Amino acid sequence: MTLSSKTIPSPVGELTLIASDAGLVAILWENDAPDRVKLGAVAEDDAHPVLLMAESQLGEYFAGARKRFDLPLDFRGTDFQKRVWAELLAIPFGETRSYGEIAVKLGRPRASRAVGAANGRNPISIVAPCHRVIGSTGKLTGFAGGLKAKEYLLGLERQ
């Protein structure tokens, strides 16, 4: 099954949205590592309904008019990754959580590194807000879009 893509401009750089018929599969960064998100065949489709919804809602988010996304999501990963990504969706707008806090929520308090690895493979950045996950000391840590983008997104949400 071929996935559909649409590339859009944003305040954090060009984003490539990827969707299946079931929902949004990925939001890729301009300089994304080619192996960070595993995808099959992808074809450009500027009219795909999920991509149009995602583009619209991301525009509202960046304009400060949206605090929660309402999109069908099609996460593709291991069961553990999907559990971590579900926890990302539960982090309220404008708040942060540490890797350790997420590990505790998952019932695996010693799995903060595994949570970090799953967070780094989050295919649906921004919508599944991996930018809201920080180090235990409050320090900003790795982010697929880069630390400047992470800082921007957290600042946008603090306003």
Image (cartoon, rainbow, N blue to C red):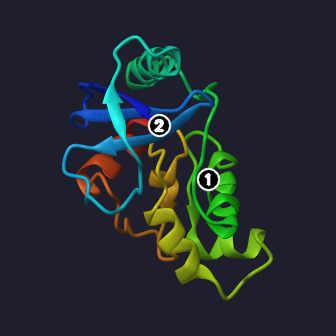
Give the number of the disc on residue 88.
Answer: 1
Instruction: Please say if the residues under marks 1 and 2 sit with CB atoms less than 8 Å apart.
Output: no
Q: How much space separates mark 1 and mark 2, taking CA atoms?
A: 15 Å
89 or 26, which is in the foreground? 26
Where residue 58 sits: x, y (%)?
Answer: 43, 24
Query: Looking at this view, is 10 or 141 the one in front?
Result: 10
Instruction: Please report the residue visible at 33 percent of the width from the left and 44 percent of the height from the top.
Output: 28
Which amino acid does the dot numbered 2 rest on? Glu
Residue depicted at 27% across the width and 58% down the height: 147
Q: Residue at x 39, y 70 (%)?
A: 139
Report the residue marked by disc 2.
157
Along the horizontal axis of the image, is 43 left or right of 1? Answer: left
**Residue drawn at (52%, 47%) of the image:** 129
10 Å neighbourhood of mark 1: few (<14), some, or many (≥20)? many
**Mark 2 residue element:** helix
Residue located farthest toward the bottom when viewing the structure as drawn: 110
Compared to residue 46, the image places residue 149 above or below, namely below
First in sequence: mark 1 or mark 2? 1
Q: Residue 56, position in %: x, y?
A: 45, 14
Which of the image's four quarters has the C terminus?
top left
Work out whether residue 49 or residue 54 is closer to the camera in this orientation and state it: 49
The amino acid type, in three-letter code, at marker 1 is: Leu
Q: Residue 98: x and y, percent?
A: 57, 68
> Is any atom of residue 159 visible in this view?
no
Residue 68 percent across, percent down from the top left: 61, 29
